[in-house]
């Protein structure tokens, strides 16, 4: 019995070692100089990536309010399969509880625009075999992360070539009492100009015509109206984009379906 337990323990350790050695999921800690803190990020690489020499495109995938860097994998485990299917690297940064992916003008612990668009990208491109220019980078997210993805891509078109939003808060002004946004930008009535400058729908003027854009929202979502308004504004400004509206609410049932459309769109952009 003693030898049996010993052999079982050795077998278990061996299996654990094999799992770690073959794992395509890393938890990467990155120190942000901008915020003076370590930030965890989930990195999913395609199967057998270590033995392939070709560089991989990267999708940065953002979570929503109250979420963490583990949300996408825990709620939609199939994204691990999607990384293999589309032969891409998926990076899920931790965006804080309610950062909205701004560089907050009033809170130095919330500089997520600098973190994701500069610090994180530099580390990912050094550590992984990536296509290290905009032709190989896309960014997408849900809810707060949908806002963040379009916000960062619109402002940094030299970094990302494609972007997507699922149920995104693409106009934050009607929601100035919600989700701690005022803790990032200051109270709305006292800081109207700051809010106007940091809502996605007001950044359309930055678009130069070569950023690929996809966004969608469900009919039953509280962000449905602001997404329709962004769609209309893009049409009025002659900005090419893909917009989808369909039945659904603000939940993981909707997002686990929506991500499939975005991945096909990004795969086409990457030339897959």
Image (cartoon, grey):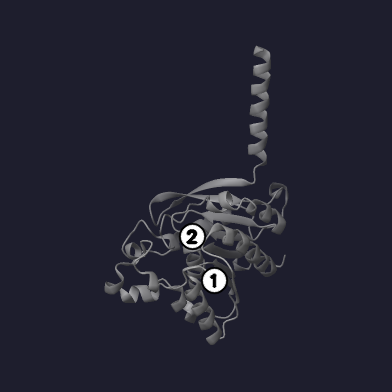
Identify the residue at image location x=44%, y=73%. Answer: 171
Tell me where residue 189 appears, x and y as whole percent: 28, 74
Q: Quadrant of the N terminus?
A: top right
Task: Decide which of tag 2 and tag 1 comes sooner along the chain.
Answer: 2
The residue furthest left is 190
Give the distance between the C-alpha atoms of the residues marked 2 and 1, in whole angstroms.
31 Å
| 165 or 40, nearer to the observer | 165
Tell me where residue 50 appears, x and y as whole percent: 69, 47
Identify the residue at image location x=52%, y=62%. Answer: 142
Question: Is residue 76 among what the camera can see?
Answer: yes
| 25 or 250, nearer to the observer | 250
Q: Quadrant of residue 235?
A: bottom right
Contact, mark 2 vs mark 1 (Cβ under 8 Å) = no
Tell me where residue 216 appears, x and y as whole percent: 57, 70
User: Which-is-in-front pick, marks 2 and 1?
Assistant: 1
Where 89 sits versus 23, above or below? below
Disc 1 crowd rating (10 Å Cα; few below 14, some 14-19, many 20+) is some
Q: What residue did someone put label 2 on?
A: 116
Disc 2 crowd rating (10 Å Cα; few below 14, some 14-19, many 20+) is some
Where 171 sits versus 24, above or below? below
Where 142 sits versus 71, above or below? below
Identify the residue at image location x=49%, y=64%. Answer: 143
Identify the residue at image location x=71%, y=56%. Answer: 85
User: Which label was assigned to residue 219?
Assistant: 1
Q: Quadrant of residue 162?
A: bottom right
Q: Quadrant of the C terminus?
A: bottom right
Look at the numbered disc 1 and give the secondary structure of its residue. loop
Look at the numbered disc 2 and give the secondary structure of its residue. helix
């Amino acid at each position: 019995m003693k030898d049996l337990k010993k052999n079982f323990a050795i077998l278990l350790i061996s299996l654990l070692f094999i799992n770690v050695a073959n794992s395509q999921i890393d938890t990467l800690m990155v120190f942000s100089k901008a915020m003076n803190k370590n930030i965890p990020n989930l990195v999913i690489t395609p199967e057998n990536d270590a033995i392939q020499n070709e560089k991989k495109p990267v999708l940065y995938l953002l979570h929503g309010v109250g979420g963490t860097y583990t949300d996408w994998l825990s709620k939609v485990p199939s994204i691990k399969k999607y990384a293999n299917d589309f032969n891409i690297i998926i990076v899920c940064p931790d965006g804080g509880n309610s950062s909205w992916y701004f560089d907050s003008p009033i809170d130095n612990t919330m500089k997520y625009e600098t973190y994701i668009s500069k610090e994180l990208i530099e580390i990912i491109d050094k550590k992984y075999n990536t296509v290290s220019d905009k032709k190989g980078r896309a960014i997408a997210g849900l809810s707060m992360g949908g806002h963040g993805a379009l916000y960062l891509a619109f402002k940094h078109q030299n970094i990302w070539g494609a972007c997507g939003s699922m149920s995104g808060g693409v106009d934050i002004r009607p929601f100035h009492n919600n989700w701690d946004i005022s803790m990032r930008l200051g109270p709305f009535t006292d800081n109207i100009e700051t809010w106007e400058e940091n809502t996605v729908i007001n950044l359309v003027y930055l678009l130069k015509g070569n950023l690929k854009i996809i966004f969608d929202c469900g009919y039953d979502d509280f962000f449905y109206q602001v997404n329709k308004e962004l769609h209309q504004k893009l049409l009025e400004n002659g900005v090419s984009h893909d917009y989808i509206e369909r039945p659904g609410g603000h939940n993981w049932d909707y997002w686990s379906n929506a991500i499939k459309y975005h991945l096909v769109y990004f795969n086409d952009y990457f030339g897959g």
